[in-house]
Image (cartoon, rainbow, N blue to C red):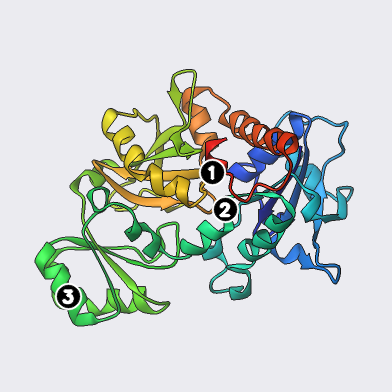
Amino acid sequence: MKIGFVVNDVMTEQAGFTTTRLAHQAHQSGHEAFLLGVGDLAYDRDEFVRARARCAPKDKKYKSPETYLAELHGKKAISQRITVDELDVLMLRNVPSDDYLSRPWAATTAAEFGRVAMRHGVIVVNDPNGLAKANTKMYFQLFPEEVRPRTLITRDRDEIKAFAKDEGRCVLKPMQGSGGASVFLVEKSDIPNLNQMIDAVSRDGFVICQEYLTAAADGDMRLFVMNGRPLQVKGKYAAFRRTRSGDDMRSNIHAGGKLAAAEVTEKDLKIAEIVRPKLVQDGMFLVGLDIVGDKLMEINVFSPGGLGSAQKFTKINFNKYVIDALARKTNYMQYYGRNFDNVDLCTL
């Protein structure tokens, strides 16, 4: 299998990133793995998509993602221009929100090029047409109401203040963005002085006002879903918990959150089942569900991270099973031909 991984920038990738772990696993499993940045893509005059990509020597093995990535970042790394349309799989693992401010041109580029590559039979995951619907957190509102917190999305200060007053306690965050940036917990005592928070969140667009879930005090759980089903191997789920640090309401790891083992309950599996039909419909091959209590806080479809964290607590290398699933899709397409416009990739 020839597989390409699209990231924001190859040189800013880190060994602990899930994308690096997936690429390392693909290489160790005998597949040809290529890393390419959004800015490395090109649409040539012959109407083929090509890219400047980095890869490791086929006959060389690497004990860890660290040594593998060091090879790709090194001066002796194999850098070559590849024809993306000749890949079996193109995995879109860039994070658009990381580019919205510094490189706005890059935010949607990978999905756009991926859509063109699909014309020549490349398996592109997650489906770029599905990702186009998910460019902002508004996508979350398209899922069943029973799994979502009460939400208002607006730029109107009076509406935000009215929502905060009615809720008594709520969360403000930007409609675009990730990682806990510009996220505020609004208490009753904050309402008279809410303008400063609104200014901080609304400077880049719309404001999401969300019901505060009391279960958030215990952190959240990330559960990986693959092919529409919770990723489970040997009776263990690809999941982990993130708990808060001190008084910080955010459980994001780079916001000070701590990792812990996760216990996946029937409640969590029910949530995954409720959102499964839409995930499958939108071609979302690998997704991260962030669960708080009996609600979803977020659905990560662009570059869900943390497979290494799940492995830390379960001792299961889930990366292998993700790559194996992609290899099965490739084998299916090679057997039946590359014209699979009516084939649901999430069912293979």
| Pointers 2 and 1 in contact (C-beta within 8 Å) | yes
Per the image, label 2 sits on a secondary structure element best described as loop
| Eye-nearest disc, 3 or 1 | 1
Question: What is the distance, in whole Å, between disc 2 and disc 1 at their CAs?
Answer: 8 Å
Q: Within 10 angstroms of label 2, few (less than 14), some, or many (20 or more) residues?
A: many
Per the image, label 3 sits on a secondary structure element best described as helix
| Amino acid of disc 2 | Asp
Residue reaching furthest to the top: 234
* 301, 46: nearer the viewer: 46
Q: Is residue 253 visible?
A: no
Is residue 306 found left or right of 55 in the rendered image?
left
Is residue 125 found left or right of 71 in the rendered image?
left
Which of marks 2 and 3 precedes in the sequence?
2
Question: What is the distance, in whole Å, between disc 3 and disc 2 at their CAs?
Answer: 38 Å
* 73, 39: nearer the viewer: 39
* Residue labelled with disc 3: 161
Q: Which circle marks residue 127 in the picture?
A: 2
- Percent position of residue 233, x then y: 50, 23
| Amino acid of disc 1 | Phe
Residue drawn at point x = 59 percent, y = 67 percent:
108
Question: What is the distance, in whole Å, between disc 3 and disc 1 at their CAs?
Answer: 39 Å
* 244, 85: nearer the viewer: 85
* Residue labelled with disc 1: 285
Q: Quadrant of the N terminus?
A: top right
In this rendering, the answer to whether 52 lies above or below 308 is below
**Residue 15 occupies which quadrant of the picture?**
top right
Q: Quadrant of the C terminus?
A: top right
